Image (cartoon, rainbow, N blue to C red):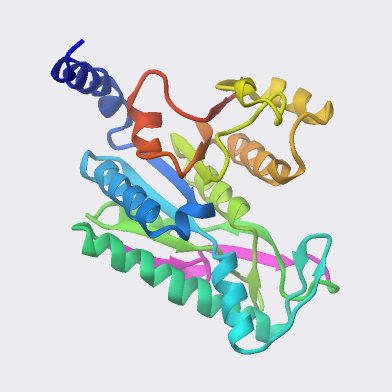
Amino acid sequence: MMDSEITAQTLTESLKYLLKYRDQTVVIKYGGNAMIDEKVKESILRDVLLLKTVGIKVVLVHGGGPAIAELLAKYQHKTQFINGLRVTDEKTAQLALMALAGRVNKSLVQDLIRLGGNAIGLSGVDGRLIEAEQLSEELGYVGKITAIHPEWIDQINQTDAIPVIASAAMGLGGAIYNVNADTAASRIAGALQAEQFILLSDVRGLYRDFADENSLIEEINLANLEKLVSERKITDGMIPKIEAIKYAMQEGLGRAVLLDGRVPHALLLELFTDKGQGTLITH
């Protein structure tokens, strides 16, 4: 088949998906190498702008672990970890907010505008978008999300701008908490009853055997996913993502996808082609 025929076939194939997702909400958790590699970052942001241009209500949620670590090092503020969670005193919480809501968030907004789109940057603190309570006294200002107030996102989605949300949270007493970015994104997806929730990371998706690249799971429902978890066939690093997805789907999320953000145009291939990319998780 000639290149022109392949291009025409791909465009024709995409039409049904363009119609399906038009005016629907798609929440994207942006993270992994896609946030560090400038070439990959620009490719993803261009695809995000295309989604917005064809009428999809795109919501971009991000963390910023490397930026937080860099800022803590710059201020020579040492922290420790307990069971993989950073012990967060008040200074650490303030520096984390600077990194997330300042450097990372505004950099993404700047890039989206530079590439020809429009964006508004928020953190979960703004408008009490993400509420949290202290997870434990031992961890300090590490929060457990208790509520999502998506009204500001809804308002931005009525404009030409893309909401870009940093995963910090506000406590009822005014304290600012660090929260897991995957959890924050999934809770936002559930609150918005998004059609699709996409988690970008550095792996292709879920595997039946992580050592075997040919064992990628292209589609799985929640019941079979629970079975894989109980059989310990899911890597530990994926468990928090799975738990976040399960909660969001209980709240009204349509479906979720685990996607390798390093693959060129992975977002477009996932949303607009029959084959898709990564692992699709359904009810």
Viewer-nearest residue: 259 or 173: 259
- Furthest-left residue in view? 4
Residue found at x 78% / y 31%: 229
Tell me: 148 left or right of 37.
right
Q: Is residue 96 depicted above or below 118 in this figure?
A: below
Residue found at x 55% / y 22%: 218
Residue found at x 28% / y 49%: 46
Is residue 31 something that shows in the picture? no
Q: Is residue 27 depicted above or below 218 in this figure?
A: below
Task: Point out the stretch of residues depicted in magenta.
Answer: 119-136
Q: Quadrant of the N terminus?
A: top left
Question: Quick check: is 216 in the magenta stretch?
Answer: no
Q: Quadrant of residue 213?
A: top right
Is residue 267 something that shows in the picture? yes
The percent position of residue 194, horizontal first and vertical second, equals 45, 39
The percent position of residue 87, horizontal first and vertical second, equals 77, 73
Tell me: 118 left or right of 268.
left
Q: Quadrant of residue 85?
A: bottom right
Q: Quadrant of the C terminus?
A: top right
